[in-house]
Image: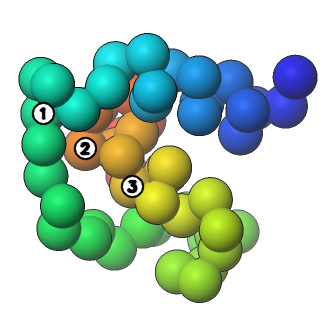
Amino acid sequence: MTRMQALKVLVRAIGSQYYSDDRDIDLAFADVKGNDPDAKVLQQAVKKAILSN
């Protein structure tokens, strides 16, 4: 399992019932561009305080 796959599991496990926010945030990760397919997962992880930006 990759780090991204593990992060997807965590984001989905927490779900959106506790924190629903559809606004996009600018990611400070140098290796992830805004058009990256996993950018939304990273944004959700930051919003849910799984990762710090």
Residue 15, quarter of picture:
top left
> Callout 2: helix, strand or loop?
helix
Q: What element does badge 1 sit on?
A: loop
- 17 w.r.t. 48: above or below: above
Left or right placement of residue 14 versus residue 23 in this view: right
> Crowding at label 1, few (<14), some or many (≥20) Cα neighbours within 10 Å?
few
* Label 3 CA crowd tier, 10 Å (few <14, some 14–19, many 20+): many
User: Residue drawn 50% across and 21% down?
Assistant: 10
Left or right, residue 35 beside residue 48:
right
Label 2: how many Cα within 10 Å (few below 14, some 14–19, many 20+): many
Q: Position of residue 8 (x, y in %)?
A: 59, 33
Foreground tag (2 vs 1):
1
Residue that mark 1 sits on: 19
Q: Which mark is residue 47?
A: 2
Q: Are marks 3 and 2 in contact (CB under 8 Å)?
A: yes
Q: Nearer the viewer, residue 53 or 46?
A: 46
Residue nearest the viewer, comparing 18 with 4: 18
